[in-house]
Structures are given as C-alpha cells and as structure tokens.
Amino acid sequence: MLNDYEKKHLRMLRRQAPGCTLFLKRNHDFPLKSPCEIALFGSGARHTVYGGTGSGEVNTRFNVSIEKGLEKAGFSIATTPWLDAYDAIIKSARRKFVADVKRRMRSAGPLGGMAAMGSVMPEPEYEIGLDSDAEVAIYVLARNSGEGSDRNAVKGDILLTDTEIRDIRELSERYRRFMLVLNVGGPVDLSPVSDIKNILLLSQLGACTGVVFSDILLGAQNPSGKLTTTWAAWQDYPDMGTFGERDDTWYDDGIYVGYRYFDSVSKKALFPFGHGLSYTEFRYGDPKVTVKGTKVAVTLSVKNAGRFTGREVMQLYVSKPHGKLDQPYQVLAAYAKTGDIEPGKSENVSIRFDFTSLASYDQESEAYILEAGDYILRAGTDSRNTGVCGIIRLDADAVVRQVKNLCGNPHITDWKPGRKRRVSVPTDAQVFEIKAGDIPTEKVTYRVRQTIDPIIDSLTDESLAYLAVGAFKGSGALSSVIGNAGFSVAGAAGQSYLGLEEQGIPSIVMADGPAGLRLARDYVQDGSVATPIGNTIPESIAEFLPAPAAGALDMKDKATTVLNSGRIRHQYATSIPIGTAIAQSWDVDLAETCGDIVGDEMVRFGVDLWLAPALNIHRDIRCGRNFEYYSEDPLISGTMAAAVTKGVQSHKGCGVTIKHYAANNQETNRYNNNSIVSERALREIYLKGFEICVKEAAPKSVMTSYNLLNGVHTSEHRGLIFDILRGEFGFKGVVMTDWIVVGGTLDKTSLHRAPLAELIAAAGSELVMPGCETDVERILDGLIDGSLSRDQLKKNATRVYNLAKELKEKE
C-alpha cells in the first residue's frame, strides 16, 4: 500500500508533468473523446524508459509503462500479440548484447567493470506484422542513454532503424488517427519521418510516465513544453571542435553552441530551439517595452484562440552589436510562461531581464563588457519565430565586471562563421537609450575570508586529513565508485567522515540523483549502520558484472546476519522527470515542485545532501548524460537548477550539490579527458549556468567534474574553485569531487594522470569523495612536503563542519 507521501508526490507530478511534454507536430485528430480499442506498437510501449541509467536511476516502488497507463485509463490494447513478439526479440537481442559487453569488459582488464557503465543496446531490427482492427494507432519510439557511455550516430540510437522508419510510415498511411510518441531523453534524427502529422515528445517522466500519456491522449491534460535543445537532421549539426576523443577534447566551436550556431548561419533545423505545440492555439498582442535604468521589461497579451485550456511560453532574444567581439545572431535573454488560459481568454505576460546580463567576456581586457551599439529585442515563441519589439542603444562601451583570466591559455582559436545571417530591423522600431556612464563597474577583489572554527583548530593533522575525505569503505571498492559508500542511510552514495562525531562534528549523508533519491528500497538497521537488502548498484550495471563481482556487491547475505536485530524497513523514493524534461516545461514553479518532492523525502530518510541538480550544457547531442542536464542554453540551465535548488532547500536541513563543475560534456574517458576551452566560451556558455544558480539560490554544495580543464583537473583548479566560484560568484558552501578512487578510475593508458588528494585540498576543495586510505596518506604527505598548507586544510574543514551542523537541523 502506498504511503500518504507517495500518493501526494505522485499526484503533484501527474498534475504538472504534462507541462514537460510538447507536440513537435500535430493536426486536429487528437485528443480522443474517450477510451477505445487502440493499436499500440514500438519499443517504448511496454518497455517504457522512465529515466536514464547510472546515478540517474531511482529505486522507486513502481513505474507505470505506457501500456499499463492506457489500460488503467480504460483503453483496450488490440496488439498484445505484437508486444509479446517484440518481447521475445528484445530478450534474444539483449542476451547477445550483454555477452558482447562482458567480452569487452574482460579485454579491458582491471577497469573492465567501469566499461559497462552506460552501455545501452541499440534498438534491433525485427519483422513483426502490424495487423489490427483498431481505428487508432500509437507508435512509441524509445531511446535510453546513461552515465559512463556516449550515444552514437547509428541506427537504433540517434538514427532510426529501418524497421522503425518502415513501421511508422506504414502505420501513418494505414490509420486515420496515428500518433508517433517519443519516449526519449534527447534528440533523434526524425528526418525520415518528419512528415508524420502528430508527433508527441513525451520524454521520460519518471514513475508516472504512462499515466501522464493517457491523460494527454484523452485531453485531460494539455502539453505546454518547449524544446531546450535544437532537433536537427544528424548531418546538419555543426562539426567544429571535437567530441568523444580519448585524451583531449577541443572546444573550437566556442560560443556557437546549439541555436547560436543554427540561427547565425541560417541553417534550418527540423525543430528549432524553443519550439513546442499544444492542443490549442494562441494569438499575441503587440509587445510594449519599458526600460528603467538597466531593468528591461517586455509586456504583451497572450490570447487562447483555440478550444482547449492551455499555457504558452514567451521568449525574448537579443541580437548584440558586432564590435570588437564576434557575436551570434541572437541569445536568449529572458522567458516567461503563462498560467492556464481558458479558450477565448487572455493573459498579460511580462518578460524581464537586466541589461547588464547581456555582457560578453573580453579575454584581452579580462572583463565582462557591453559594447556600444544597438541591442535588438526580439519576442516570440521559438528562436526562429520572433519579431523585433524594440532597440536598446548603448552610447559607449561599458565594463560590467572587471575580473581576471583564470582558466589557462589553451592556445585555441574559437570558430567564427564566415558568413552570417543578416540582422534586419524595422525602421519604425522604438529605441531606448542607455548611457554607459550609468552602468557601474564591479571590480572583483578575490578576497575570500574564512574564519577557522576553534574545534577545527584543535584537531590533529590526521583528523584533519580524514575530515577532508569521505567515509570510505575498505580501501575504496567498485561499489564506492558507483555511488554506494554510505553507512547511515542504506544505499546512500556516500557521506563525510564519521570518526569525529563524539567531538561534535557530524557526518553529512549524501544521496545520488538527479531524478529523485537513489537509495536502497529495503534495508535492516543494526545500530547506526543501515544495511541494504539486495543489490545496491544500478540495475543497468549489475547485469554486466561477472558472477564474483556481482556476488560481492549483493547485500543479501550481509543483511541476513543482522535480520534478527530489527525488522525490514523501506525507503520508497519518488522518481521525478529527467532534467531535460523539467527544463522543457520552461516553468520554474514546476522545477521547484520537483525539488520540493525530493526535499520532503530527504527529511523522511535522513539525507542531508542531494547530489543534484546537474546542469552541464548540451554541447553535443551524443553526450550520454544529456538527459540529466537541462539545455544547450546557459540561461535555461541556470534558472532551472536554481528553481530545483530552492525547492529542495526550502526544507530545513536539506541541501543540493550542483554538478559537474565544469566543461563536462562527454562520457568517453570521462575520468581523464582534458576539455580545451577558451576563457570566453567557458565563461559565457559553460560557467554561466552555475553562476546563475549560485547567485539566485545559494546551493549548499558544488561537485567538480572528472575531466581536466586546459590541462588541470577541475578538482585541483584553484582558479576555477577558489577564484571564480567563491571570489566571483560568491559561493559560500562546500566543494566536493565526483566519486573517484585512486587506482579505481584511472586508465593507465590515458595521457593525463589522476587527480591527487593533496592538490585537491590545496585548491580549496573541501571533500575528496568517496575517499580512500591513499587519499588520507597523500594529504598528510602534502602537509609535510609543503604542497598543502595546514591553514588551507583547516579552512576546508571549517566549511565542512559548518555545513554539517546546518544540515543536521532537520524539520
């Protein structure tokens, strides 16, 4: 029987999750008036994907597939024989795939276990007849991806299989009412079926995915989302820069990521950034622009001209002047979503932003600047459907913030388009003047003060060293690397050092994310230790492990020894929509609701820090973890992460860990890959979302990424951690590493070495997670050889202590 909190959280998600979905195309064949007999096909019909693999997996009590959701809603499935036949095909293909992965694992040597992470089987080809007497047909196309592996431009992954193309086209011709449903976490190349009349991007909505779809199909809910990543034919995506390289990845694409590229070179996408349709239509009034100081507002009326209650998203883009700095055609400056608008009714929408937020980074002057000229405001419903609504004219160059180049000289030349789309402006466009002299210059001093707490000051070097690493198990096993290093909460990803609790320094308990809390469903309590029952590693990894390794990680035998000491207990966490789906809502209230659900469950289960949200940029659609991330645009990424953060941290004693800081945009050799990025691209694209989240929501913790940045591991990068994060963004919390174990995550054939604990601490990062004895020894050696000062170590420890005290004050 469901607990009351589970019922409440599922009701909340069922009500709001349709806002994460959108029609890429539609006519007026849907919604259906009532349940009926339906022909259901496709890989996602019965094998619905609720979220990606790896840290994003949630051990929820149950999930509702699309098939089950339709049956619960009263539909009769006419194609059960097809679904049964597909089951047999997928089962056979899966056996072969798992065997192949195991062979690759054996050939990979000691790190073979890590090679299985994120391994996703491409959709197989098959021959099954499409016979049915139903009048309505649904084809559910599903794709999965996950932590540890990247996607590929092959059939069954980014590309459609021959079977899928054939069946989708045949169903479209055979049935008067046909809908293609995309149960995917990222773009697929729909060019072979782009003429299908009804295409719903359902995405991956967690436990309630199937229920939400049935609500949409019957018109009980209306999609209202918009794309946060450009969907194009595979061959039309840009090929500047590199992706998936083993050692060094070159970000030659600079600031031309996503729509910034497509819009600037006038390359047509299948579905542009910001695109999304619902069951209704809207009409728009003339925008009115007001400028007060540097505060800009664009207000317009939105009228529902259709037959269904719905919501609309208004987007505001700005074309910047081309001066010293090259600029893309336009950038998203602000957005706003209406409430529910009934047919025939209107709502006034106000889109607001600060003019100084448009500043670009000039590497030569080491400053964020606004160049003199015309800033053209464009309001619309996606990046390709906008109209000029005003011009802001700046009389001279202005320095918004004076900083320093801190991320190294990568000797990279950012790509610039040879021929750009022309910026045209109506002659009657209203002009608003801002004087550069009225824009103050912020001068960052980089003075970050941290008073050492007396309790920390009294600790021995050894205690300080242990406090700088996680409460590791043994010497650092595979289970610790993949997020099972906790003691106090069963299945928790990890926690800080336990050995100083008698001296008043509590341990911080951390649970993985970002689609909900990943904890053990069942466990037994033995004193202060919670022992999971069953396998605690992600299901997507367990099936690939050889018997000895799987046995070592299975907790059944260990739990049996303590069963007599207490009853079996349960932790049923709620699976929320994936990050990309949350962002597709363009609704910060929805994002905050998702955070609120997680925060409530953190209090219930005794979790202090949630290892989420993740807000890396969708630089390339092949990144295996894009489903966890929000967008190709840093404004969307930052505001969504901030909203989720506010939701979680509205619960006393609960904090988030925003990740992965920074330039973590591929999974290939993720532990030791070097991202080579210009200072401008880094600051305008890859760091801006983190800056927005820190300034708007004050997250309690930040997790660095595995990769190197311009030759330095991000976890060892003092310029990135101490100067930019703390000195420029004003971050006050704790910085931790991603889950690394020396010897467990380093491929000896990699060009770049593994991160070192003493250098991590010296950079101002407080915690090496999940930690191992070697990390402690290196920190102690660093104190002796001078690579790490005791003063820095005490400041790090003080931040850990202060956060631990704060988070233990639960509701």
Image: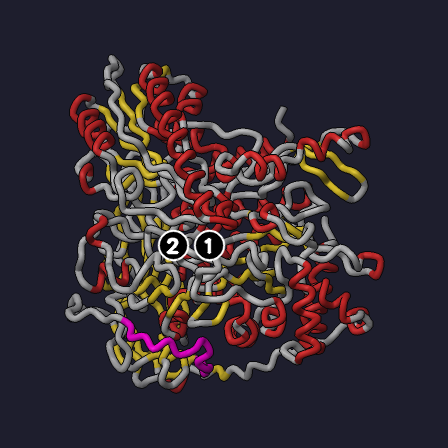
Q: CA distance from mark 2 to mark 1?
A: 10 Å
Q: Main secondary structure of the magenta part?
A: loop
Tag 2 near tag 1, CB within 8 Å: yes
For residue 479, side relative to residue 248 (left or right) = right
Q: Residue at 72% across / 50% down in the picture? A: 810
Give coordinates of residue 606: x percent, y percent.
70, 45
Can the viewer see residue 37 in this picture?
no
Q: Residues within 10 Å of mark 2 (few under 14, many from 20)?
A: many
Give coordinates of residue 778: x percent, y percent.
66, 68
In front of the other: 670 or 584: 670
Q: Residue at 23% across / 63% down in the picture? A: 388
In the image, residue 481 sits, relative to residue 319, either above or below, namely above
- State how the image is colored: secondary structure
Query: Would you identify the image quadrant in which residue 172 lies?
Result: top left
Query: What is the span of residues highlighted in magenta in the rendered image?
Result: 401-414
**Sequence-earlier tag: 2 or 1:** 2
Query: Would you identify the image quadrant in which residue 741 lies?
Result: bottom right
Can the viewer see residue 433 in this picture?
yes
Residue type (three-letter) at the residue carrying disc 2? Ser
SS at badge 1: helix
Residue type (three-letter) at the residue carrying disc 1? Met
In the image, residue 144 sits, relative to residue 264, either above or below, namely above
For residue 287, side relative to residue 455 (left or right) = left
In the image, residue 29 sits, relative to residue 111, either above or below, namely above
Q: Residue at 38% across / 59% down in the picture? A: 246
Residue at the spot of label 2: 631
Query: Would you identify the image quadrant in which residue 665 lies?
Result: bottom left
SS at badge 2: loop
Residue at the spot of label 1: 640
Does 356 lie within the magenta span?
no
